[in-house]
Amino acid sequence: MDAKKRAELIERYRDGHRAVLDALEGITEEELDRRPGSDDWTPREVVHHLADSEMTSAIRLRRLLAEEHPVIYGYDEKAFAKRFTLGRPVEASLAAFDAARTTTAEILASLTEADWGRTGWHNESGPYGVETWLRIYASHGHDHAEQIRKARTRS
C-alpha cells in the first residue's frame, strides 16, 4: 500500500465517529431499539458494538506495533452485543468509540515505513498486519453508520 492510499484510509478512519454521529442525529429511544430484521442489530447494539470493537482494535494495533509477531485473538461480537447492550444509554459508548479512534489516529499519523510492515497472526484469519488492520477499520464506522441509517428507515 502506498503512502497516498494509507493517508486516504487514515482520514476515512478519523471520519468514522462523525459518520456515526450523523447517522444518530435526532434518533429517538424507539429508533435506538428498532430491529429491522430478526438477525439485524438495533442502532443501540451497533453503538455498543462500536465501542467494544474500537477498544479491541486499538489494542490490536498497539500489540502489532509493540510486540514481535503477536497473536491477535478474535472475539464473539454477537455475544458481546447481546450481553453488554441491555438497554444501556449510548453516550459512554460513543465517547469510548471517539477516544479509541482519536488516540489511535494519532499513532497512525506517526508510523514509519517499518511500522507499516509489522505483522502478527490472527487466530481466526491468519496473517495480520498493520496495513490489514487499517483496511479493516478505515470503513468500520462508516459501514455501521449506514447500518444505523437503514435501521431507522425500516419499521
Image (cartoon, helix red, strand yellow):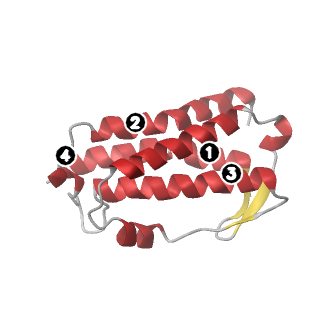
Give the alpha-carbon distance from disc 1 to disc 3, as whole Å: 12 Å
Q: Which mark is residue 153?
A: 4
Residue that label 2 marks: 19
Crowdedness near tag 1: few (<14), some (14–19) or many (≥20) residues, C-alpha within 10 Å = some
Q: Identify the secondary structure beneath mark 4.
A: helix
Task: Please tell me which of labels 4 and 2 falls first in the chain.
Answer: 2
Q: Percent x, y for residue 128?
A: 72, 57
Give the alpha-carbon distance from disc 2 to disc 3, as whole Å: 22 Å
Residue that label 3 marks: 61
- The residue closer to the viewer here, 141 or 87, is 87
Give the alpha-carbon distance from disc 1 to disc 4, as whole Å: 29 Å
> Is there CB contact under 8 Å for labels 2 and 1?
no
- Nearer the observer: mark 1 or 3; the answer is 3
Q: Is 42 positioned to the left or the right of 8 in the image?
A: left
Task: Please tell me which of labels 1 and 3 falls first in the chain.
Answer: 3
> Is there CB contact under 8 Å for labels 2 and 3?
no
Residue that label 1 marks: 135
Residue beneath the point at 62% across and 42% down: 104
Q: Quadrant of the C terminus?
A: bottom left
The outermost residue toward the top is 4
Q: Is 102 positioned to the left or the right of 120 in the image?
A: left
Please state which amino acid type lies under the numbered disc 4.
Thr
Residue beneath the point at 30% across and 60% down: 88
Q: Percent x, y for residue 65?
A: 77, 50
Please state which amino acid type lies under the numbered disc 3.
Leu
- The residue closer to the viewer here, 7 or 45, is 45
Residue beneath the point at 55% across and 46% down: 100
The outermost residue toward the front is 92
- Report which quarter residue 21 is drawn in: top left
Task: Please tell me which of labels 3 and 4 falls first in the chain.
Answer: 3
Q: Identify the secondary structure beneath mark 3.
A: helix
Q: Percent x, y for residue 132?
A: 68, 49
